[in-house]
Amino acid sequence: MYLAYFIRSVYALFALLALVFEAFPWTRDTFVKYGKTREEAKEEPAEPVQGASDSSTASIAGNRNSGEHSGSASIVPQWFAQMTVPKHTFSHFYIFGTICSALVTLDIINWVKGQSGSQLPEATAKCFIQLYISWEQRILDSDLATVVAFPHKITVLALTMCNMHIMLRLKESVYDQPATKARMHISQYAVGIIYYAVTPLAVVVDSFYRPAWKSPPVWAVIAGLATYTYASVHQWRCHHILYNLRTQSLREDSGYVVPTGDLFAYVACPHFLCEILVYVAIWMVTGFQATTLLWNIGWIITGLGITASESHRWYKRTFGDKYPRNRRALVPFIW
């Protein structure tokens, strides 16, 4: 279980750091702000209008009044605080994530085929994941057969959903985002790379160990697929709305406006809500057995919750009465 525990600890660390960095002004300025919030902070105290709906750097869009820490000494060295990369390098996350997810999927397919013995009986000897687990069990001096289980075939469907989501985000980051001068801290870039390295494994890692997964209820698979489709479609629509608004503002050299249409009628950051629903849907498809994926969802909720809350406050402060009073931050009608 070392691999599962390691991945869970990564998500727990991300969530903890997000909460700590958001709590202190001197760390918030360096590690929380990115994109337009880094630029706006140079001119006036401001909060983010919108962050990318990316769970890897989810907490990195929060922002509060930069005047909060006026006169307080920063504990972050200036040279380190200035280590930034262009925000459009978000596409690197999805390129790396697509590769990692594809490799894990191929490995699982080989393992599942090897289990059946009908087409590829020698496949298990070539699976990198099983080789790692064998090494893990040798270190623990335990019987491999009493610990390791063949991954259930449902893991292939879950990984396919993960692959599709990451590839869609890659397409959007390359073709549906206008070029800007926005930047983010190098540590945020590192978080994104690490996140997409471990998340494909988080979907299936619990199926490698005993007790073996059971076949998920049909209703859970259907509900998961329906939720996934709903969230993916609406996330694409919301991203398209934001893309059009940003493109128009750059072309006309105008400021931000309040997004309208689709789920923006209910929350300030519906693309964040859809990101959460996508991973909840994948968890549902596994029959609620992917415990490590729950840790991933916890990180996403923590990070995107911080971002959505900050964005919601920024809208209300910036647009005043023009901002819909019944619109919530992340959860319709509730919060």
Image (tube, helix red, strand yellow):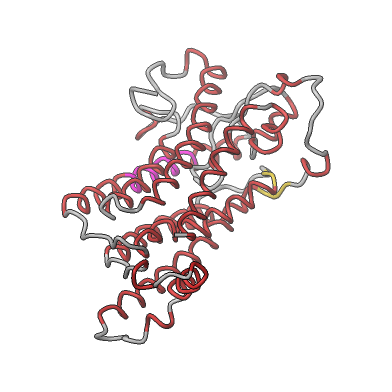
Q: Quadrant of the N terminus?
A: bottom left
Tell which residue pokes out farthest to the top in this image. 321
Q: Is residue 267 above or below residue 84?
A: above
Indicate left or right for 227 with 250 as reference. left
Tell me which residue sits at (28%, 63%) in the image: 212
Q: Quadrant of residue 332?
A: top left
Magenta stretch, residue numbers: 231-242
Image spot of residue 144 (x, y percent): 39, 72
Q: Quadrant of the C terminus?
A: top left
Residue 234: within the magenta? yes
Image spot of residue 71 (x, y percent): 81, 19
Q: Main secondary structure of the magenta part?
A: helix
322 or 153, which is in the foreground? 153
Indicate left or right for 321 with 150 as reference. right
Tell which residue pokes out farthest to the left in this image. 218
Looking at the rendered structure, the number of numbered marks drawn on it comes to 0
